[in-house]
Image: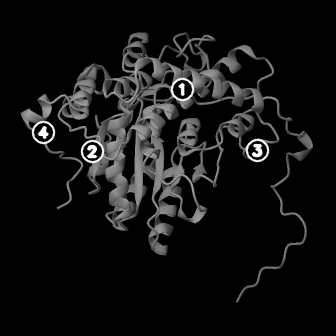
Amino acid sequence: MERDVTTPPRETEDQLASPSRRGFLQLAAATGAAVSVGRSARALTELPYPAGDLSDEKLVEMYRTILRIRWHERTQADQMLTNPDYRGYNHFYAGQEAVATGVCANLRNSGPRDQLDLVYSSHRPSGHAIAKGVDIPSMVAEMDFRATGMNGGYAAEMHIADPDVGFAGADGMIGPAPVVASGSAFAFRARGSDQVAVVFAGDGNYAAPHFHSTLNNAKLLDLPLIYVCENNLYHQYAHYSLSCPHEDIASAAAAYGIPAVTVDGQNVVEVYNAAREAVDRARGGGGPTFIEAKTYRYYNHWGAPGAKAGELGAFGYDPLAITHFRPEKELRAWMQRDPVDIARKILVDWGVVDSARAAEIEEEVKAEIAEAFEWGLSQPLCNPEDGLKHVFAEGTVPARQFG
């Protein structure tokens, strides 16, 4: 009988006492849990954390992915703060890296296009794109409107896409991405494919009608859709509780009869395990899953106001917010449970690598990202006269036939 993700089994006292990966992660999740996810934290401390199919190589690669996202965001923020010629912008993903990493580590990210799993993004797409495997130098060029960027400089941040890895793209609007993702999931089901569609959307999507129509249709049609709600507590500058009556948004999804789970979005292994179960369900014809990851963004809603070059996070005043919309203590408390630190501690405590090697990996990633920015920002800028390309059909267009 399939286990409902909303009711995970309890571990025995012997299991909890054993010095295993599972025992360590139980302890890690409990640390600072009251700060991180409120009422749900108490349930999280009761969840099992099996290593599953996570090899040492897979764990190291997930750590690298988290670091790639983190140092891309930090480097881009520094460019925005210090380089007057930099034209790029971003809704930064720093602080949420474990969510995209844990989910995408379960997906098909390479191979023929018609076999790839698809990821749809809304806001904060850079983290999802990197986790799905896009070419980072090409993305850097794209975000600065360079002609050789991954989308020719036409997408910038909010519409980046790469079909070669199954990153279907971002959406600057709040709401449509889940509907479009469910359309892909329907296509997979209609073709008899075992591909999976994943959509990442924030807590603000709950207030949009697309949220409910997507879940309703996904359940009615048993679509291979995984809806990942990245609940970072704030949509733009308002706390999610102002528009959502549920402490756990996952409870709204459960009302549609969809398996739903709330996870600690700072812990990449916990996210990975929840996503693994969801992917297995979808591929096996079991229909959709809703994953709510409680997480937190280190920068303000958009850009780098309030941040300082060389420092992680934004603690200063954001003029776009009118007021200080979140307390500094809250941000600093969440940074005590940083996804990078947790991933590193897992590797070291499990004996995958030692502290020195973990530090070396981070330096390697920092160099990789620095090189990506050096290449991307050296590329030619777009030509203004090319602005109307790809807007109108070019050449001879055959007449459409009706009848």
Residue 43 image position (x, y, % from top left): 19, 34
Label 1 packing within 10 angstroms: few (<14), some (14-19), many (20+): many
What residue sits 36% from the left and 20% below the top?
Answer: 337
> Going from the N terminus, do you reach mark 1 or mark 2 first?
1
Which residue is identified by label 3? 154
Which residue is identified by label 2? 251
What residue sits 38% from the left and 62% below the top?
Answer: 283
Asked if the residue under mark 3 is in contact with the one under mark 2, i.e. CB atoms within 8 Å, the reply is no
Asked if the residue under mark 4 is in contact with the one under mark 3, i.e. CB atoms within 8 Å, the reply is no
Distance from disc 2 to disc 3, alpha carbons, whole Å, reads: 39 Å
Which residue is identified by label 4? 11
Q: Nearer the viewer, mark 1 or mark 3?
A: 1
Amino acid, disc 4: Glu
Q: How is the image coloured?
A: one colour
**Residue 306 against residue 235 in the figure, above or below:** above
> Going from the N terminus, do you reach mark 2 or mark 4 first?
4
Give the side of residue 4 with respect to residue 136, left or right. Answer: left
Amino acid, disc 2: Ser
Which residue is identified by label 1? 70
Distance from disc 2 to disc 4, alpha carbons, whole Å, reads: 24 Å
Asked if the residue under mark 3 is in contact with the one under mark 1, i.e. CB atoms within 8 Å, the reply is no
